Image: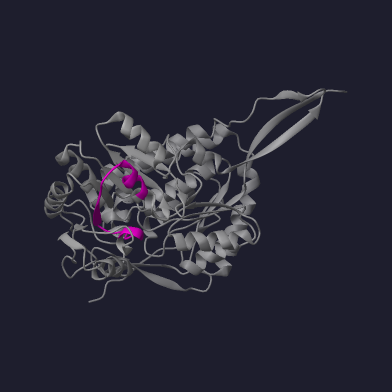
């Protein structure tokens, strides 16, 4: 007996709409592997309509005062709290994540981040006005950039939507946001919430696939393109945007080194690292998945980490004892399985290394040791519940191994030696360095990387600034 699939729709100019040509894709719950909804497979006509709506709304939203934009964002934050259970249900269906952890680990930060950017709207910064040339006064205007084309990923679809729209709208821009084709449900619900608060056209949602995203980035209307996704996707966006010199904001992949020195409390370090490595099934660009351990404690650490992995469970969203749910889609499951299948002979699977069950896309917490710096699994982003372990001899080698990848998003250092921690924080070539912890983020601090992890910042005043432009105004003091 078949179940009728729920119909998700685009949100354009204050209205929910199907794709202009009626095309749809099925949306699958990764915990069950079964379709639960359809979403528009948007084409050029849909993108044109969304961009037109955003462009029409821009002058009015740009000219609102910071206080008015703050008030709207505070209402949005309140609405997120009031409708938290609906958001949780949509996100769990999107991703298969544990319900309890989605409630405690995602809703509060999202609400806090929206409120942060509500405050940031009223803290526009620039050089003070002054007479830098005799008889002339100069000052700086900080203005919104215009329409922003934004593409969010499938690992944190709800939270990444917030990271996209909140600073853009706070700065006075209008938005066309595309969720991943595998996780549109929570973003469509967000559109409903924002649509009840913002003027029509300020926030628009277009569902679709990579082609839809390409059409958005190449469209002549947006002044800025922002994407959170893979390195390949980011490079494609940068290339497309270069054709008309759009501003580009890229938060891409990661391969975070976790450098563990010999003076740590092994049990505490393993507890923190395993949680930071396996949370969200390792589907996090900052996940603690590449551990470098001093040779004197390497074997002890590996044994403890393998034991911790064997004690961690993955399972269905309503199971309160699981740390993480499934991988997001069958392609991602195949990618993780492929990394393990292609391991070199010198590698050892200390724990996991296999799929869990025959329903959904679950994969066991995995530990791989015996690796060399140039091994594929060390160099490339797995984006799954797999932690690799290498040993190092001294601080210089640890730095060389840590920096010896093409990614540069996040890292951590585990040591009781304060001077060593400070040296490492300077030498590690990553956008974030945690010390004796890994993965906490706060709205006040920037998140973003270097090298192939992209450029631009999410969160913080720096993230807000990325959605503004600077204009110099000079006036004569003479009549």
Q: Residue at x 57, y 49 (%)?
A: 174
The location of residue 65, given as percent across then percent down, is 60, 34
Drawn side of residue 424 relative to residue 196, left or right: left
Q: Is residue 384 magenta?
A: yes
Tell me how the rendering is colored.
Answer: one colour
From this viewpoint, is residue 114 visible? yes
The location of residue 86, given as percent across then percent down, is 32, 50
From this viewpoint, is residue 10 visible? no
The relative height of residue 195 versus residue 52 in the rendered view (above or below) is above
The relative height of residue 123 versus residue 174 in the rendered view (above or below) is above
Drawn side of residue 242 relative to residue 430, left or right: right
Q: Residue furthest right?
A: 479
> In terms of depth relative to the viewer, which is nearer, 425 or 324?
425
Please give the range of residues in magenta. 378-400
Q: Is residue 109 magenta?
A: no
> In terms of depth relative to the viewer, which is nearer, 262 or 16?
262
Total count of labels: 0
Query: Where on the picture, by quarter, is residue 442?
Result: top left
Drawn side of residue 464 relative to residue 312, left or right: right
The location of residue 94, given as percent across then percent down, is 32, 59
The location of residue 472, given as percent across then percent down, is 71, 35
> In terms of depth relative to the viewer, which is nearer, 376 or 329?
376
Q: Residue furthest bottom?
A: 1
Q: Residue at x 59, y 53 (%)?
A: 54
Q: Quadrant of the N terminus?
A: bottom left
Drawn side of residue 474 relative to residue 148, left or right: right
The relative height of residue 333 versus residue 479 in the rendered view (above or below) is below
């Amino acid at each position: 007996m078949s179940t009728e699939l729920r119909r998700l729709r685009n949100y354009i100019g204050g209205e929910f709409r199907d794709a202009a040509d009626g095309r749809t894709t099925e949306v699958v719950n990764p915990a069950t592997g079964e379709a639960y909804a359809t979403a528009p497979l948007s084409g050029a006509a849909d993108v044109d309509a969304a961009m037109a709506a955003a462009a029409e709304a821009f002058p009015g939203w740009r000219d609102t005062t910071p206080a008015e934009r703050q008030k709207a964002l505070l209402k949005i934050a309140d609405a997120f709290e009031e409708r938290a259970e609906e958001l949780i249900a949509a996100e769990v269906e999107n991703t298969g994540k544990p319900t309890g952890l989605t409630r405690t680990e995602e809703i509060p930060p999202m609400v806090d981040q929206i409120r942060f950017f509500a405050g940031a709207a009223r803290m526009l910064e620039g050089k003070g006005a002054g007479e830098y040339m005799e008889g002339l006064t100069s000052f700086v205007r900080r203005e919104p950039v215009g329409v922003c084309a934004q593409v969010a990923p499938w690992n944190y679809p709800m939270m990444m939507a917030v990271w996209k729209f909140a600073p853009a709208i706070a700065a006075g821009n209008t938005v066309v946001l595309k969720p991943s084709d595998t996780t549109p449900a929570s973003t469509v619900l967000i559109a409903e919430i924002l649509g009840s608060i913002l003027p029509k056209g300020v926030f628009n949602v277009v569902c679709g696939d990579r082609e839809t995203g390409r059409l958005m980035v190449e469209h002549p209307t947006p002044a800025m393109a922002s994407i959170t996704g893979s390195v390949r996707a980011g490079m494609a966006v940068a290339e497309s945007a270069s054709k008309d010199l759009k501003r580009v904001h890229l938060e891409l992949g990661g391969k975070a080194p976790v450098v563990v020195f010999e003076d740590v409390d092994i049990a505490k370090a393993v507890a923190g690292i395993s949680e930071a490595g396996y949370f969200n099934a390792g589907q996090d660009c900052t996940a603690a998945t590449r551990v470098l351990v001093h040779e004197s404690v390497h074997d002890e650490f590996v044994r403890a980490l393998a034991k911790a992995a064997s004690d961690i469970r993955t399972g269905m969203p309503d199971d309160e004892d699981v740390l993480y749910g499934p991988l997001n889609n069958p392609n991602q499951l195949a990618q993780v399985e492929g990394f393990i299948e292609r391991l070199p002979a010198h590698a050892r699977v200390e724990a996991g290394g296999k799929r869990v069950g025959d329903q959904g896309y679950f994969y066991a917490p995995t530990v791989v040791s015996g690796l060399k710096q140039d091994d594929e699994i060390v160099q490339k982003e797995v984006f799954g519940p797999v932690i690799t372990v290498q040993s190092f001899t001294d601080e210089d080698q640890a730095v060389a191994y840590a920096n010896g990848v093409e990614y540069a998003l996040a890292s951590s250092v585990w040591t009781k030696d304060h001077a060593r921690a400070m040296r490492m924080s300077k030498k590690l070539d990553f956008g974030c360095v945690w010390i004796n912890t890994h993965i906490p983020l706060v709205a006040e601090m920037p998140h973003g990387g270097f090298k192939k992890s992209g450029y631009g910042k999410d969160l913080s005043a720096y993230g807000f600034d990325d959605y503004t432009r600077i204009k110099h105004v000079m006036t004569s003091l003479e009549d």
